Amino acid sequence: MVSFLRPIKILFRCKSAICVTALLIPVFINAQEMPRMVTIPPGTFTMGSERGGYDYDESPIHQVTISRVFRMSTTEITNIQYEEFSPEHKALRGKDGFSKGDNEAVVFVSYDDALAYCAWLSEKTGRHYRLPTEAEWEYACRAGTTTAYYTGETLPENMLKNQKTERELVPVSLEVGLDIPNGFSLHGMHGGVEEWCLDWYGEYPSKPVTDPAGPYKGSYRVTRGGSHNTPVEYLRSASRSAAMPSDKHSQIGFRVVETDIVPKTVKVETARPLNESKVRQRKARWAKPSEEPVWIDPIPFVIPPADGSPFYSHNHQPAITWCRNGDLLAIWFSTYAESGREMVVLGSRLRKGSRQWDPASLFFKVPDRNMTGSALLTLEDGTILHVNGVGDSGDWKRLAMVVRRSSDNGRSWSEPVLAESEHAVRHQVIAGPIILADKTLVQCCDAGPGGDDGTSIHLSGDNGKTWEDTGATIPGIHAGIVELKDGRLMAFGRGNSIDGMMPVSFSPDKGYSWTSKASGFPPIGSGQRLVLKRLREGPIMLATFTERGMTIFLSHDEGQTWTKGKLLSDGSGKTIAGGAWTGDFTMDDSHAEPKGYFACVQTPDGVIHLISSRLHYRFNLLWCER
């Protein structure tokens, strides 16, 4: 069926240039494949909210003027509409159980895919289509309302699509146009799928603005509206989310606007976080390894921010590396709940010559996404590799693997790249990646969110630019891994006990196949993560937990035998706060920290830097052997 898109009589109702232009171009198109548009009048509204907490990015509230009329699609773009442009997308219908029908919102489209559709539609019709700006989207969503939703302070039951965080997504219909429309006759503005906006994500201005389009550059594009399988508070008119432009999954789609307004971006100067500030670039001269045992009392590396960075009650799962300027860099997640989307990755720096760590500051955050699992690795040329998990709209089960790099000691970082783009299991990054003798990088990830889901192995032959999952799963989550002198890999992990003991696994082929057996070490459990590390002097170190607490074992024969074990304690009898799941503990001759997530690096001066969930321990091999 074909039809004229706009009746001639509308020419006399609307003085906008966009309306006149639309009428002067006679366009015939299949009506089912053409987005239905409604006119949004100009106006002024108050944008944002003052909720605070993890919704801090919704403030300051500010006045926004939309100066000219524009038109917006009444619903999200549907499968049949999008597939007129991209027929190959049909293969993605029903993926993860979503969006099978013609009239369901299209999903698994990236920001660039959405832009390409707009360009195609513009060329096809002779009109100008684009994505809405964030301000246009909120203005259109509110439709004159000032409440949390355009329906009031709550959403009616028939507009909800399983509005809670789910580890396993619950399939729901994404058919468009069935919910209660707002005052502008728009459907689907609260839930269904998140919608790409034109803007780069950035801080709000504090002064009134007209036709804003956000900052002129950034790392993430704004998404709005919330989605299915998402807590209802993320569906509010003011709620902000964002995603990497290349990301695509079952919870993001888009709608379009038709307008001749060319929004102007603004230059926004943002202050560097402390961990990126005043970072010296001179290459450090490391001291020669000490010929005496070294033990330095533990100090905290998790210190509340002084620069306003988000900081929550639960700080956990650290990673650490050394910088060629002599600094140490540590990162960890901070959150209210480990499944939370408020989770941020914070960083701190122990600057060369300093006796205490800097206060924490923001290191990495994709807005409104769970960020579980981080790793750091310093490559041979001094480049620092950062690997992180990034969620979709759920908890830490469905993660993509993201990589960044720094060539200036962590002063600046490349834009994040989706190294393994599927939001799926096997991508929960574990601290402690290693470099094999043939320069292959090995990154361990938890193979699932459960305590007995084991560890997956990921390889990179190009210094972390691309990665391959070997497909193998070894017993034990949070695994530590080393390369033996005969080329085999050896790994220890938590859970999946064998004969009541911690499992040890061996691979002859860089992680594609494994054999496992009981290790002889006691298993570890909740709130505990081990470290397995080849020391510069040659021995392999296993830092784990026994009934007495943190214990160091050494092997001088490639894991065949191990020393009796050294308690990681100075015997002082002092009580220390361990943070996270550890709490307070007493360090004496018989007890050390009972829990903690270990991460470890050894600097060129031979000092072993082991961090738990809050504390930084420093010692050397001679102290372990004493």
Image (cartoon, rainbow, N blue to C red):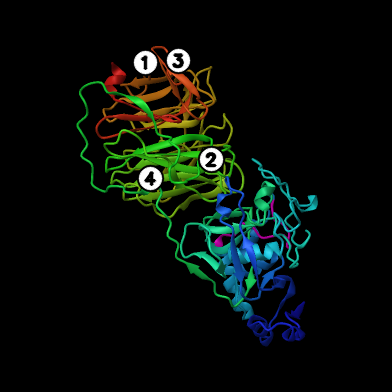
Tell which circle, 4 or 3, labels the residue nearer the N-terminal end: 4
Q: Residue furthest front?
A: 207
Q: Is residue 17 above or below residue 95?
A: below
Q: Nearer the viewer, mark 3 or mark 2?
A: 3
Q: Which residue is mark 3?
A: 548
Residue 80 image position (x, y, % from top left):
70, 66
Camera-side residue: 447 or 512? 447
> Which residue is located at x 76 percent, y 57 percent?
151
Tell which circle, 1 or 2, labels the residue nearer the N-terminal end: 2
Q: Which residue is mark 4?
A: 275
Give the residues in magenta: 98-111
Tell which circle, 4 or 2, labels the residue nearer the N-terminal end: 4
Provide the secondary structure element on which disc 2 rests: loop
Helix, strand or loop for the magenta stretch, by majority: loop
Kind of residue indicated by mark 2 = Arg
Mark 2: few, some, or many residues within 10 Å (few <14, many ≥20)? many
Q: Nearer the viewer, mark 4 or mark 3?
A: 4
Q: Which residue is mark 1?
A: 572
